[in-house]
Image (tube, rainbow, N blue to C red):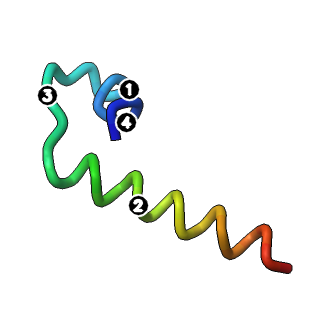
Amino acid sequence: ARTIADLGEKETINSSDVSEALQYRYLDRDLWRR
């Protein structure tokens, strides 16, 4: 989530940053299961 906030040049992490990070994490898991 920190990296996503950094890409958006934000000082703090908010709930949408965490949500986006979790989406990428789940996407990554699905790709490696195949």
Residue 6 picture location, percent across and down:
33, 23
Residue 20 image point, x, y percent: 36, 55
Instruction: Tell me what residue is drawn at x 27 percent, y 47 percent.
Output: 17
Contact flag, marks 4 and 3 (Cβ < 8 Å): no
Local crowd at mark 4 within 10 Å, few (<14), some, or many (≥20)? some
Q: Position of residue 13 (x, y in %)?
A: 18, 36
The residue carrying mark 1 is 7
Which one is closest to the eye, mark 1 or mark 3?
3
- Position of residue 34 in the picture relative to residue 7 (left or right): right
The amino acid at mark 4 is Ile
Label 4, label 2: how far apart the Cα atoms are: 11 Å
Which label is found at residue 22?
2
Query: For the residues carrying marks 1 and 2, which lies nearer the camera in this image?
Result: 2
- The answer to whether the residues at label 2 and label 3 have Cβ atoms under 8 Å apart is no
Q: Which residue is mark 3?
A: 12
Question: What residue type is disc 1 on?
Answer: Leu
- Which residue is under mark 4? 4
Mark 2 and mark 3: Cα distance apart in space = 17 Å
